[in-house]
Image (cartoon, grey):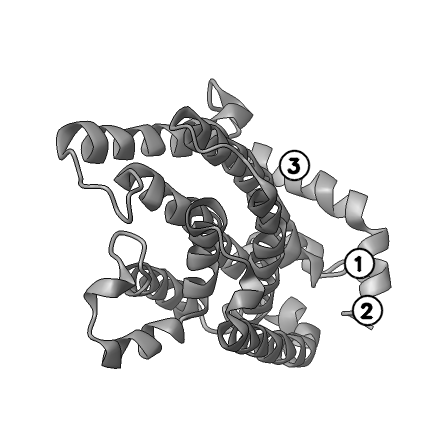
Amino acid sequence: MEFKLKPLFRELIFISNLAIKDVQTRYLGSFLGFAWAFVQPTVQVLIFWFVFQVGFKSAPVDNFPFILWLMAAMVPWFFISDCFLNTTNSIVESSYLVKKVVFRVSLLPVVKVVSSLFIHLFFICFLIIMFSVYKHFPDLYTLQIIYYVICSVCLVVAIGWITSSVVVFLKDVGQFVGMTVQLIFWLTPIFWSLSILPDKYKNWIKLNPVYYIVEGYRNTFIYKRWFWEFPNLTLYYWSFTLVAFGIGVIVFKRLRPHFADVL
């Protein structure tokens, strides 16, 4: 069976090796090579810091420096958006592997997620350092970030199985995903606070699963709240993710036999 979990765990090393190679391939031929995976987002973070903290002198949010409040949401967004875009094209980009009977094609979106996860873990450490510079040191709540990383991985893998299999037959899906990622960015309280909206709109924003993760990072680093303090939101998130996971399994299984014919 394509989606059995035990083979997936046994192939963890194999997935990790492919993920490392994937990151290296992205920057193949460049002078800094693999280092660009960390340099580009780091420069982006520094630009945010200079613009909002030094230039605009943005007011604190809930008594926290705006740059910390912003980056607590931007770091998970970097990971999620990168996964959405890269998993969508994972099968098309590796069409030469699809025709190999012994290769589990369902691993291709997972490889893209793991390669992005390597970079994401680096930026979690970077985020912890940023908070420490402002004298907000790690505590017990920081461990909760493990939970939200798992939440993020489950969501992007589920969506990735759907989009990566459909895009093989409908190339426009890639463009649709790109536009959807931009829309989700502005519908998620990353640059803005949910408190500015009228109450009648807040529940609609919470239907966005990315909201759960972004607010989870802020609850971990800023507000010091555990995820179980929001049982309804947690239940909704996992219900959404499991439904997406189920749809992903069904869609992938039905379309998988036709990949080689199309590619």
Crowd class of label 3 (few under 14; some 14 to 19; many from 20; radius 10 Å): some
Residue under numbered circle 2: 4
Residue 74 seen by the camera: yes
Crowd class of label 1 (few under 14; some 14 to 19; many from 20; radius 10 Å): some
Towards the viewer: 17 or 132: 132
Residue under numbered circle 3: 20
The disc labelled 1 sits on which kind of residue?
Leu
Q: Which mark is residue 245?
A: none
- Residue 107: quadrant of the picture: bottom right
Residue under numbered circle 1: 8
Crowd class of label 2 (few under 14; some 14 to 19; many from 20; radius 10 Å): few
Q: At numbered mark 3, what does the secondary structure look like: helix, strand or loop?
A: helix
The disc labelled 2 sits on which kind of residue?
Lys
Towards the viewer: 178 or 235: 235
Marks 2 and 3 sit apart, C-alpha to C-alpha, by 23 Å
The disc labelled 3 sits on which kind of residue?
Ile
Does label 2 or label 3 sit earlier along the sequence?
Answer: 2
Task: Determine whether 170 is above or below 32 in the image.
Answer: below
At a point 58% along the width and 61% down the height, the residue shown is 151
Query: Quick check: marks 2 and 1 in contact, CB under 8 Å?
Result: yes
